[in-house]
Amino acid sequence: MLTEMDCYNTDPTMSALPKLLDSCGRKAGVTVRRKIVPDLRTRLIQLAGSHAVPDLVLLDNPDLQQLAATGALTDLGAAGLRTEGLYENVVAAGQYEGKLYGVAPGANSLALYYDKKLLADAGLTPPTTWDALGKAAKKLTSSKRHGLGFAVPATEEGSFQFESFFLSAGAELSKLDSPEAVRALTFLDTLVKEGAAPKDVLSWTQANVQEQFANGSLGMMVNGPWQLPQLKKAGMSEADYGVVPMPVPAKGGTPSGALGGEVWAAGNNGAEKSRKAAEVISCMVNEKNSLTWSKLTQYVPAAKSAAAELAAEQPQMKPFVDGIAGARGRTAKLGATYPAASQALWTAVQAALAGQRSPSAALAAAQAEASR
Amino acid sequence: MAYALSEPRTAPGTTSGRTGKVRRSFLLRLAFLVPVVVHTAVFFLYPLARNLLLSFQDYGIRSVYSGDAPWNGLANYRRLFDDPVFHKTLGNTLVFVVVSLLAQFVIGLGLAEFFRRSFPLGGVLRSLLLVPWLLPLVVAGTVFRWMLDTSNGVVNQVLLALRLVDDPVPWLNDPGYAMAGVLLCNIWIGVPFNMVILHGGLQAIPGALYEAAALDGAGPVARFRYITLPQLRPVIGVVLTLGLVYTLKVFDVIWVMTKGGPANATQTVTTYGYQLSFGGLSQFGLGAAAGNLLIVVATAFALLYLRSMRAEDHTAPGRK
């Protein structure tokens, strides 16, 4: 008997996950008891305090390092989990100090969604560079809508979205105030100052951005592949919108961004349970299951071959699949100190976009804050 | 002895009857106290003591699992006072509390005065005004968040339609306005509480006082100043003290509306304490220290209030 916790409280994933757990559990000869916990991170910290982390947990990848650092998670590599054939950066996002603590069934990255009709009416092609993105956003802005929407609230979500500009510019999370970082923030700052992006980006979540895009209030948006089913629900078809990779600062650059998605990890509850947990996880992230699961979540499968298969099958997923190759684990360089840097970063983005500080002053303050 | 216990029959000549009865009634009284004492100890005193100790420890994410957190004296408090963001939260908290209290009180008192007269549907209206109090804070916060949305919020649509503003007001997206935005919501939530308590207080003032004052030629302002306010004093004390404690610990409203943003413009000591502990930094010692400062402030005001109440009791015998 293994216990499991995740935070998937909406369908299709909510009802699909127990089926996957059951079938993989059967293979390993265990039953899995599932529990949905909305605020999973806080809950896991509490459970770590009482040494009662469940045998299986599906948690957001930037939180993995901190939890692994406590010793509450088990070393899955030692428990016999193999990661051949998975994206190296996705595997790295599940490692802490060289050991494997988590594996993602699928990963995600951000891309640019655009309203086909609006772009065509304005005589625009989907932008590939920041310059073109800025011009398109301005041109699409009218009294009824803003050209571009993104989400930079005062949470991890804000850092995640900003990082797709920040990392594409060539900045590093270990140095928040580099010229490249200032360039990225200045770009977004200008968009907001000129009214091409709404001030609401400071309080909107990614889900809110998708709602605004679906109701025609935004010409383009920065968002993840998990919004594809949501757009379908809102009545948009593939004839209405397109997806292209994140625009880059200058022609010829490669888009980069933060690697998003949840990872499977296992509580440190003894060798026997760890071995069983590793068996169940390796079944859940194998090529076949990774593909089926990713189709449900609209994530990019962690197995390269499955990802290629998905891109061939669903053209809309191609920009996201391409995006994964260049995406970076948020904790790759900073490990357990990432959350501190992230908080400093989203505060800087907010300070600049709210007109409180210049981008360079805001980022300088962030670097000072992160290294306090 | 107010507790009539069935007296056990004891053989004559033994003395255990009397003392046994006393002991039993004492035990019975104790038994009634036990649940309250246990509940308070477990759910109130223990967490409080734990939080106090926590604030003198370097309690990071690793301590959670291992349980060992080195004592670091006043280091957490020192770090807090060296933190520019914390200075900001202190100022924000002061503004949030003072403005909330004043506005809630003034509006609440105005409404209470208004409902003093009986008029058709007065009772219905009064109960309708209680709705904000009954709503979960998360619901109120979420609705206000959408109403105050810069691009699509109904508040800006109305202001623009009435030509009161030329551009949408960035209610929750500008450091200059965000505090006003969360205050609007918090005041709206707090008015009914003030109104109900003050209304009760007003009902208790004898009408004869006003009649006498009117005969002496006192106008409405004088009547309010020399009769209503002095008579309401104890009630005002209750409302303001409770209001202060409630407002100090407001978390959900701010968290739902702005997460303390933009750029910490609406970060109060409460939200910042949460952020330090659970927002990713996992600095539980620092979070506890921030929480303790609030407890100290709230306790100080509660004690002041209790003292003034005692003084009231001495000056106005028989008045409860």
Image: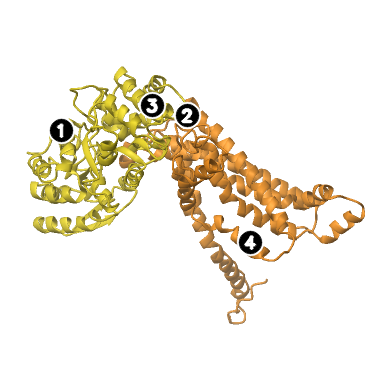
Chain colours: A yellow, B orange
Q: CA distance from mark 2 to mark 1?
A: 37 Å
Cα distance between the residues tagged 4 and 3? 47 Å
Q: Which residue is mark 3?
A: A189
Report the residue marked by disc 2: B85
In the figure, is residue A246 to the left or right of A290? right
Judging by the rendered image, the residue that carries numbered circle 4 is B125
Residue B316: horizontal and vertical position, in percent? 80, 53
Q: Residues within 10 Å of mark 2 (few under 14, many from 20)?
A: some
Q: Position of residue B261 (x, y in %)?
A: 45, 35
Q: Amino acid at mark 1?
A: Ala
Quadrant position of the C terminus of chain B in the picture: bottom right
Residue at label 1?
Answer: A325
Q: Is residue A159 above or below residue B118?
A: above
Q: Is residue A144 left or right of residue B127?
A: left
Determine crowd level at label 4: few under 14, some 14-19, many 20+ residues with C-alpha closer than 10 A: few
Q: Nearer the viewer, mark 3 or mark 1?
A: 3
Q: Nearer the viewer, residue B37 or B298?
A: B298
The residue at 70%/46% (across/down) is B307
Residue type at numbered disc 4? Leu
Q: Residues within 10 Å of mark 3 (few under 14, many from 20)?
A: many
**At which x and y percent is residue A252?**
17, 22
Q: Are marks 3 and 1 in contact (CB under 8 Å)?
A: no
Q: Nearest to the eye among marks 4 and 1: give it.
A: 4
Label 2 resides on the chain identified as B
